Image (tube, helix red, strand yellow):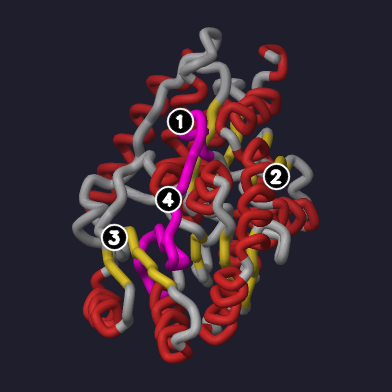
Amino acid sequence: PIGGASVTIKEIVEELAKYPSIHVDLIDTSPPIYHSKRMPGISFEKIWRMLSILQNYMWKIRNCDSVIVLANNLFVTTIVFILLMLARLCHKPFYIKPVGGDFDLYLATKMKPHRDYLLRIMRTADGILLQTQHLKKILTELGCVNSHYLPGVRSLPQVTKLTKQQSKFLRLIFLAHITREKGALTLLKALQILSKKNDIGVRCDFYGPIYKEIQKEFLHEVEVTPNVRYCGVAEAGTGSILISNYDVLVLPTYFICEGHPGVIIEAMHAGVPVISTNHRAMPELITNGKNGILVPVRDSHALSMAIREIAQNSILRKRMGRENYNRRHAFNSNVVVKQMIDIIFPQLI
């Protein structure tokens, strides 16, 4: 489905296709009804899908040189052990790339036998490819010495130079799934605080799919907040180009699964500063006061102050944008995929 994980997989696969000595045989494990509803508990569809994945995997693993499983937490619990054992029987290297950045929190919720089982899977794999330094540090301390840091990834936009039109307003963009945890309502409250001060000109556009549980409240807050628009869902792959039309990306997230949000990497490519939260691995991407501003989670007042600060200081805003642009190389798809190949197929480098 639309989201950071699926875009990351697409970026990795497309970059791997540029190597003539590498062929990717992809098994899509996404449930076909994902968009319509979630599937709690055990169901016939789930069992059938698991058997289909295993059949496909057993057919393809014979001719492969290595296996990479991009897995969410539930997938690690249910099927990865079987995939790992089959890879061992076939003498194939096996790597796990967790989707998102919350595997440590998932472990913390489990009873000791379940937690030990998950850690044994991780330790038995030839490597774990982790999106954040934070998660790598924790898993290494838990005995997963096969952990590797492989940051979030986005490809460079297909333009040579990104430019902005001048405006008397500070133009903000929120580009993410519109959920409570991504901070959409927190941002709207901050904008309402600023509108009452009436001392700076701010406009904000929201892009992203609206989740049903927040839809009514979100649309109401948009309607009552001055200079705010909901602009629909942005076209996939256009993030950097879209962000380049704005002055600041705002992502006041407290999403529990947050790793390296692709939208922040896209802001780097666009040379646009970021206002976000001091949450999980955000400080790995944003150095407070250097390439953006970090505020406490769920704090609309602190967020409004950060927006005011960056609105009133154009020199600071431009400096942060340049600094963000200078950091883009570490998250380019060609750089990150080369690091991945160096881990899995060092003989090709």
**Residue sitting at x 51%, y 69%:** 253
* 3 vs 4, front mark: 4
Query: As shown in the figure, which amino acid type bears the numbered disc 3?
Result: Pro
C-alpha span from label 1 to label 4: 16 Å
Gap in angstroms between the C-alphas marked 1 and 3? 26 Å
How far apart, in angstroms, are the residues tagged by discs 1 and 2?
Answer: 42 Å
**Dot 4: element:** loop
Q: Which mark is residue 70?
A: none
The nearer-to-camera label among 1 and 4 is 4
N-terminal label among 2 and 4: 2
Q: Answer yes or no: do the residues labelled 1 and 4 have beta carbons within 8 Å?
A: no
Counting residues from the start of the chain, the first of labels 1 and 4 encountered is 1
> In the image, which residues are magenta?
154-181
* Residue 113 showing in the rendered view: no
The residue nearer to you, when weighing 341 against 112, is 341
Residue 200 to residue 204: above or below: below
In the figure, 144 relative to 23: above or below? below
Q: Which residue is mark 2?
A: 123
Per the image, the residue denoted by label 1 is 159
Residue at mark 2 to residue at mark 3: CA–CA distance: 37 Å
Which residue in the protein does label 4 denote? 165
